[in-house]
Amino acid sequence: MTIWSWLRAVARPTAIVLGLGIGIAGCTALPGDGPWMGGAQGTSSEALPFDVIDLTPTTIAAYMQPPSIDKPSITSSLSAGGQVAVAPGDALKVRIFEPYEGSIFPTIQKPGADFGVQRVLDDGTINIPFVGTVQVAGLSLLQIERRIAKQLEGKAQDPQVIVEFVADRTHTVMISGDVKNPGRVSILEGVRSVVDAINRAGGPAGGGGGAGGGSGGPTQVEVVVRRKGQVILTAQYSELLAGGDIAIQKGDEIVLRPNSRVFTILGAVMKSGNVEMTKHNLPLIEALGQVGGLNDMRANKTGVYVFRMGDLQNNPAARARVFRLDLLQPVSMFVGQQFGLQPRDVVYVTNAPLYEYDKVLTSIYRTFSILSIVRSSGTSVSLPAF
């Protein structure tokens, strides 16, 4: 008789003996270590609510992640001196010069041409001595200079006008959330993109470590950009750094919030739990290494599974997928290095068959031990009917 035949013979009366143990223990059941994966092995995928995919050198090509998420930047060509329009609430500094002595305004070598801070009123105007009321809302600084010079025709000889921003009240973006210095940032200070604005606010304040012992760092945050009340961007900060940055406009709202990319690992591994993905491309083999690898005493090396939900938000008919990897095959080490995990994936390592049989035999031994103790004490036991 082989060892497998003997184990099957011993396991046949398991239900009867375990029924005795259940009665003695007050109808408590043995806890399970995870789902039974025999159905995924012996049933066609059409009969299951998910697709079962064996990871092999042939099938891995469809599930490989690109080696890098870097892509060409769309913000590298943005000008740092773009045209901006003045709006009510802005504060301007106006200076006027004339080329000759004895005129209304001094020459550029002498002081006195500064008319102080001119705040743009709600009606979009400023009031300048000797010039009068000037409509400036919606104009650029160059256009305002030309308008003031035109209004001085007949009053001054070839006036030279310089207009500058003193305080920016309208050309700002709001940054809030998980950032070091939340508040408003002026786009007049060379801020042209979302990353520029975040850097101007001190960068992400996030950090913290994951259950796997790693640290996601400040890139483990999600960036949301709203424009005129509509969300125009939702992305990880690391994706922006890899070329996904976009240009900003005045009035934009930028929110940073913690959003760690996490996968879950369960079953016969050295350390189970939630683990942060410390880099964008994380192979399955490396993920197993982060938790100390498989438990040699328990793990079934032919039963490494990855559970992945379908994209139900964008495709309600999407089916979930279960990927299966047989680590007893040497080529699976290379396949596991090419298969990339995704956030919210669940990695489950099944128990070895001998370990499962050992659990059954241990339960049988404990049950008979209890019965022996009861028999030696002379106490009668009445088992409940089920």
Image (cartoon, rainbow, N blue to C red):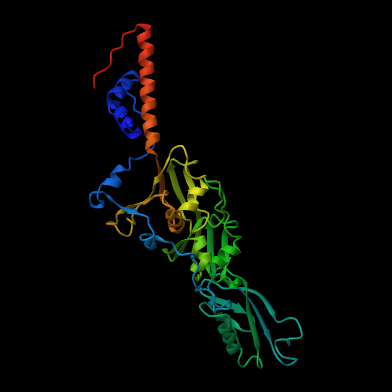
Is 378 situated above or below 139? above
Q: Quadrant of residue 166?
A: bottom right
Q: In which quarter of the image is residue 188?
A: bottom right
Is residue 245 among the parts visible in the rendering? no
- Of all residues, the one furthest to the top in this rendering is 378
Residue 121 location in percent, x, y? 55, 72
Q: Residue at image x 61%, y 84%?
A: 131
Q: Residue at image x 49%, y 59%?
A: 280
Residue 217 location in percent, x, y? 57, 54
**Figure label count:** 0
Viewport quadrant of the C terminus: top left
Viewport quadrant of the N terminus: top left
Is 4 situated above or below 279? above
Q: Is residue 375 left or right of residue 255?
A: left
Q: Residue at image x 37%, y 39%?
A: 34
Is 50 situated above or below 14? below
Nearest the eye: 13 or 236 = 13
Is residue 131 among the parts visible in the rendering? yes
Residue 78 location in percent, x, y? 54, 76
- Of all residues, the one furthest to the front in this rendering is 1
Nearest the eye: 219 or 122 = 219
Is 365 situated above or below 315? above
Q: Is residue 198 left or right of residue 362?
A: right
Residue 356 location in percent, x, y? 37, 34
